[in-house]
Image (spheres, rainbow, N blue to C red):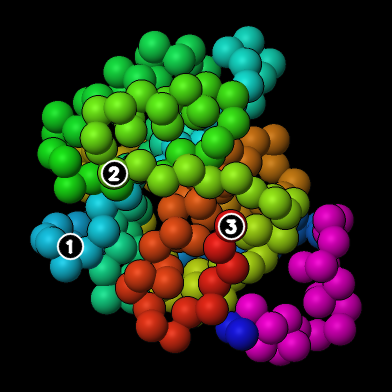
Amino acid sequence: TDFTKFMLALKPGSRSQYQQRPEMPEGSLIKRKWINVIEQAPQIDANGYLIVSIDAAASTSDTADYTAITLLYAKDTKHYVLHTERGRWDYETLKNKADAYVRKYGIRVTFIVENASAGTSLIYYLRSKRLRCFHDTPKEDKVVRVARQLPTIASGRLFIVSRAGQNGWVEPLISELVNFPNGRFDDQVDSLVQAIRWAEPKINSQSKIYLY
């Protein structure tokens, strides 16, 4: 598989860092040089997949993790991050945000929601509205889940769309990516990887991505 080839290509010392929870001085599995920042978003059409990926937190307290939402467009083996947002939202707020994406992009949007916490109720709600909604129930450690997507990211197929005046979210996202797994937060990483994991086999016929 692509993942196996990627692991074998690593130096022996580096390989162990991907196979367990690493303690790296640079704190990074994902290298900044792998991430392409572009100014122009691709044209969205029926040949690609427009995805809203939601990683819902278990609490809204000030010390809790964030709920993170990624808007991603996948087409022609490429993954374009169009927007991300995060916050400590209760279920009603999260539901309203999901509705807002449907109002803006229509029923062509596909929701990928982690089946946990408020996400479980959101899945039921979205399906009751007959919207395209898939649930994700991870069975592996989040470091392993990110490592399995490294061949996709390291090959230069991840693009972040940074529009002037609308890009306040870009640097926080990049910072979270390049500091994973040793950063304070990793919710946006979880949300993005969830979207890539779902979309990759649909846009890349050579993909051997592990799906849950």
Between 36 and 121, the one nearer to me in the picture: 121
Q: Residue at x 25, y 37 (%)?
A: 131
Q: Which residues are magenta?
A: 3-23
- Helix, strand or loop for disc 2: strand
The image shows residue 64 at horizontal and vertical percentages of 66, 19
Labels 3 and 2 touching (C-beta < 8 A): no
- The image quadrant where one finds the N terminus is bottom right
Q: Which residue is mark 2?
A: 132
Helix, strand or loop for the magenta stretch, by majority: helix
Q: Which residue is mark 3?
A: 212
| Magenta span includes 74 | no
Mark toward the start of the polypeptide (3 vs 2): 2
Whole-angstrom CA distance, mark 3 to mark 2, is: 18 Å
Amino acid of disc 1: Pro
Name the side, left or right, on which 26 lies relative to 186: right
Q: Which residue is mark 1?
A: 42
